[in-house]
Amino acid sequence: MSGRARLTVCAVVASMLAAAALLPLTDNSTWYGKALLLVLLQSAVGAGCRRVPLARPLTVLVQALVSLVALTAMFASQQALGGLLPGPQALQQLGQVVQQGITDVSNYSIPAPVSPGIRLLLVGGVTVVALVVDAMAVTYTSAAPAGLPLLALYSVAAGLDSGSAAWLYFLLAAAGYLLLLLAEGRDRMSRWGRVFSSGPPSGSFGGSSPFAQSGSTPVRGARRIGVLALGIALVAPAALPSLGGGLLDTSGHGGGIGRGGGSVNLVAALQDNLNQPSNSEVLTYSTTAKPASGMYLRIAALDKFDGTQWVPSNLPTEALPAQLPRPQGMAADVKYTTATTRVRVDDSYVQDMLPLPFPATSVQTTGAWKYQPEGRMLVGTHGQTAAGQHYTVTSMEVDPTAQQLAQAPKATGRIAEQYEQVPDSLPAIVKQTALRETKGATNDYQRAVDLQNYFTSGQFVYNTQAKAGTGVDAIARFLQTKEGFCVHFAFTMAAMARTLHIPARVAIGFTPGSPTADADGLMTVGLKDAHAWPELYFEGIGWTRFEPTPYRGSAPDYTQTTTPSGTSGDQDVAPHTSAPATTDTPTPTQSCEPGTASDSSTCAQQALPASSGSGGGFGGGRAALVVLAALLVLLLPTTPLLWRSRLRRRRLGGGDRTEGLALAAWREVVDTGWDYGIPPDGSETPRRAMARLVRDGRLTGEPAASAARLATAVEQTLYAADPRPATGLAGDVHRVHQGLKAGTNRRGRLRAAVLPRSAARIGWGLAARWTASTGRARAAGQRLAAPVRNLGGLLRGKAAREAP
């Protein structure tokens, strides 16, 4: 197999090994086979174009066009011309599928079902990365920078899924990259000829020969370096406490959000979900709680506010105990009743946290569930989800009195330190509004009720079309416009409570739902029942639910007690509607529900909502643009390096054309000296130029002798009547390069490799091409205008002759 063919195969293997990191993100791997077929087709087309040979840019262009045709045939064949060619309608269809895929990515939890949009994103993304890798490593024969797109592919997967097998996919991606580097190294050494050795070959006199008799030494050395670097990447983070467990950390003590969970899955898709027309059933339950209207089913607690979003703290989980501990901060004299709730979750609801009444005291369930004590959450591990679960929960219906809440002492210690924090970027209007609305309150309980009444008093409009967001800017905007949906109310009240030194966090889950039509006592909960509400902490009572969102759920009885600031009435339990409010009083609008797809059969597979940003986690493709921009930022600094490597290989690949090879080798040495700080001087003769290079570059021994031989070869080429054939020029260039490198410090070597000074020729070449292009354009314009001028002259002459 030729070196170029070996590189092609290794590029395919490296791309697909890196793409394997995406497999845990979906619930099936059928897309991987399609991606492999496309990558193989794309690579075969590239191999054929290089064999013709086509120009390098044309090779990449042909590969891209063939890949686009294949993607069109897979995803938009009905709109394609002849079922294959990507016409305007087909491109429009592909764009729609991509947009739907972006929405699905932000809505589904991991592992996500492979919808057409997600399939196109996966297959297309792997194909694009494979094209970049093939272009860099094979077409432009520079494998080292090809690690960047491979790293981007792995990083996307690792950023979305932090499962315990992440180290395995890292090993696969790293092995593919090392294989690609090894293939390129063999190909490069075969083109250079004899191979440098780290020491004198056996039988040499005093080690004077700089060449080895075998090419195995550098290959073995490169292999050892690659394995050592990979080992350090795996082991060092585990050995250094400040870096955590690294890739080998499989303890599972990550955040209390579980596999693929986190605030992204819970809050990213809220606004998209609020405006979905369907209300697919998520779960049904029966309960002994009376009335069931207070049975909020809680999933997670978001307790960390960094100014841009609310997220769960990164706290450890533990084995699910038979009896859950008593709720945090709850005294023995607080009144409560015990309720038993039996829950059946729909098979299509794929979420890795279990909806529970709060506070639960025991949970009887099956599966791999962990308990997070701080938020009292049940988190699935090893891919465990709530889909199809049947479980029984025993919980407390806590009923504190207004007097107990009013007499609760100030929270101290860790609770106050952790749950009263607000970012420095929080606008002053938040605290000012909180102080104004609670003026006259004499205790934290009255202040909390005053805040709830402020939001439910009729000043605010519930509108699912309002701009989403839970950061400081969104909170300030909400207080000014007084228009938003459940996350705005919940997160804003929690932030205002914290400014008053009342510990607060936000809960995500479901409102009680509604009775079923065909079963006595059975309640059904749909996507439109998803909700967000604040929880405030009172010493002696614990975490206490409040309901600031108008027309959602029901406010607890203990918040209805008359206070100095008045009362708030019971709230409507009607679900949200999709229509925005158009009057000054709140109108029922669509409920906070998790994301839904375009039909009810897939709605319940979505993740739960409520977040920071723009509603759909990617913000209409913003994340894709961010990733593209990041890749460009990574690739742009490598442009001089890629150009310099390509130019070096082109100059030293002159074959038997002795005259061209000698001059090309000469230009390469001059530019190499320039890269190491020795600028060229066009007025010098070859011998004087080499003498200056040897002096300024501090060359001795073989590098100096090689420089002299290069000068002689150039003089023979330029001035001899019958030039003698010059051999070994590539080796001479390499020895001079190594000599210059050895005589330079680390900073100089890095500068020569990454930002070579001779890259200035790029600008000179572009300027020359621009000048030539404009000159040709002017000449063409003059040629086109000449007949017009001639015709005008003839007409003027004729007119002059005919004049009386």
Image: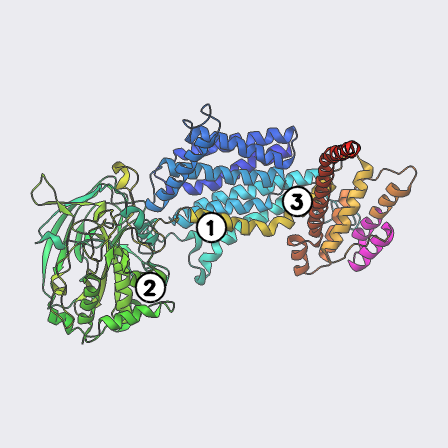
Magenta-tinted stretch: 685-709
**Residue under the point 12% across and 61% down:** 569
**Residue 131 in the image, given as x and y percentages of width and height:** 54, 38
Q: State the SS at label 1.
A: helix
Q: Residues within 10 Å of mark 1 (few under 14, many from 20)?
A: few
Label number found at residue 626 = 1
Q: Is residue 600 left or right of residue 88?
A: left
Q: Are marks 3 and 1 in contact (CB under 8 Å)?
A: no
Nearer to us in this view, 71 or 169:
71
Image depth: mark 2 or mark 1 in front: 2
Lower position in the chain sequence, tag 2 or tag 1: 2
Q: Is residue 691 magenta?
A: yes
Q: State the SS at label 2.
A: helix
The quadrant the C terminus occupies is: top right
**Residue 91 in the image, given as x and y percentages of width and height:** 45, 34
Image depth: mark 3 or mark 1 in front: 1
> What residue does disc 3 label?
217
Q: How crowded is mark 3: few (under 14 residues within 10 Å), some or many (20 or more)?
A: some
Residue 167 visible in rendering: no
Q: What residue type is labelled 1?
A: Val
Q: How crowded is mark 2: few (under 14 residues within 10 Å), some or many (20 or more)?
A: some
Nearer to us in this view, 204 or 128:
128
Lower position in the chain sequence, tag 2 or tag 3: 3
Q: Residue furthest right?
A: 721
Q: What residue type is labelled 2?
A: Ala
**Residue under the point 18% across and 58% down:** 359
